[in-house]
Image (tube, rainbow, N blue to C red):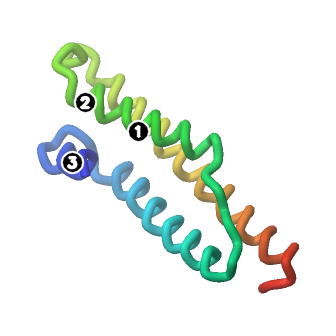
Amino acid sequence: GALFVLVGVGRFWWLPVALIAFREVGISLFRSYYGRLGLAIPATKGAKVKTVVQAFAVGFALCPATDQVEWLADVSLWAAVVLTLVTGAQYVIAGRRSTTTSGER
């Protein structure tokens, strides 16, 4: 939600926020689908790091003390995007491996 507000007020560009949002919705649906098949896909350490980096990006964007270094929030946001895409791919690969191992397709 905070990311969308920061886009709305012109602090963040919409593309990185859209990439993060797309991944979040997609992976939630993906994990839900595999959960219905009885397969658990736990959160990875990389995904947890991604969440922390996203929180830093939002914090840097909102903190008045970082007004002089706005690039810090932008770099953090793009780092979160990279982690978002990498961990999203890892989830898909893990899910595919789980179905192959369990005999599902």
The local secondary structure at tag 2 comes to: helix
The local secondary structure at tag 1 comes to: helix
The x, y position of residue 4, in whole percent, is 23, 52
Answer with left or right where residue 40 lies relative to residue 65: right
Q: Residue at x 49, y 67 (%)?
A: 28
Task: Determine which quarter of the picture holds residue 61.
Answer: top left
State which tag comes first along the sequence, 2 or 1.
1
**Real-space CA distance between mark 3 and mark 2, rounded to the nearest whole angstrom:** 11 Å
Answer with left or right where residue 24 lies relative to residue 100: left
Amino acid type of disc 1?
Gln
The mark found on residue 61 in the picture is: 2
Question: Which residue in the protein does label 1 denote?
Answer: 54
Question: Which residue in the protein does label 3 denote?
Answer: 7
Q: Nearer the viewer, residue 43 or 73?
A: 43
Answer with left or right where residue 55 lies relative to residue 70: right
The local secondary structure at tag 3 comes to: helix
**Real-space CA distance between mark 1 and mark 3, rounded to the nearest whole angstrom:** 14 Å
The x, y position of residue 36, in whole percent, is 61, 81
Amino acid type of disc 3?
Val
Q: Residue at x 42, y 31 (%)?
A: 76
The x, y position of residue 33, in whole percent, is 58, 79
